[in-house]
Amino acid sequence: MRKEQMFNEIVRRVRKDYFGKGPERIHTVFVDNMAISILNGNLTPMEKFISHNPEGAEMVRAARTKLIQDVYAEHVPDGLEELVGSPLVHLFSDFKVEHDMGVSVFIFKDAIVGKE
């Protein structure tokens, strides 16, 4: 299995554990010391219902963004740093509710080893 696919599986597992549903599709690219992941098909049925108005959509976006950043700040998922060969330093993420699409930029201390 390619490194990007293994990385995607870790990301999917974390999202599923915390949100009850993992993304349907994840595309990750490694660039220097960054892993950039685009996540599609994330919303649960409840989040879709809540986001039918602008206030609800902003609430879903803010909650998803804050929760995932807090999760990674509290504990880096098992296997993530070992897979890329470097400690995770920062995670930047955002979510576009109307497109059911999220983006996460993982910044590691060192360049990612063994990129494919």
Image: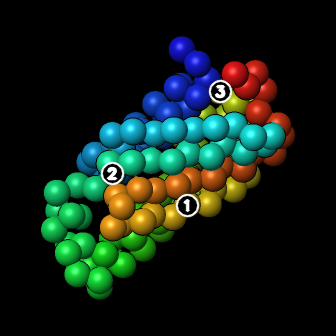
Q: In front here: 93 or 68?
A: 93
Residue at x 65% of width, y 27% of height: 83
First in sequence: mark 2 or mark 3? Answer: 2
Tag 3 and tag 1, C-beta contact below 8 Å: no
Three-letter amino acid code at the position of disc 3: Leu
Q: In front here: 110 or 73?
A: 110
Tell whether 34 sits left or right of 1. right
Q: Which residue is mark 1?
A: 93
Q: Which residue is mark 2?
A: 42
Which percent across, then down, holds residue 87?
74, 41
Residue at x 51% of width, y 64% of height: 94
Q: Secondary structure at mark 3?
A: helix
Q: Which residue is mark 3?
A: 83
Which percent across, then down, holds residue 86?
76, 36
Which percent across, then down, holds residue 47?
23, 64
The image shows residue 41, relative to residue 68, as above or below, that is above
Which percent across, then down, holds residue 30?
69, 37
Q: Quadrant of residue 58?
A: bottom left
Total of numbered circles in the picture? 3
Measured in 3D between alpha carbons, the distance from the residue under mark 3 to the one under mark 1, in whole angstroms, is 20 Å
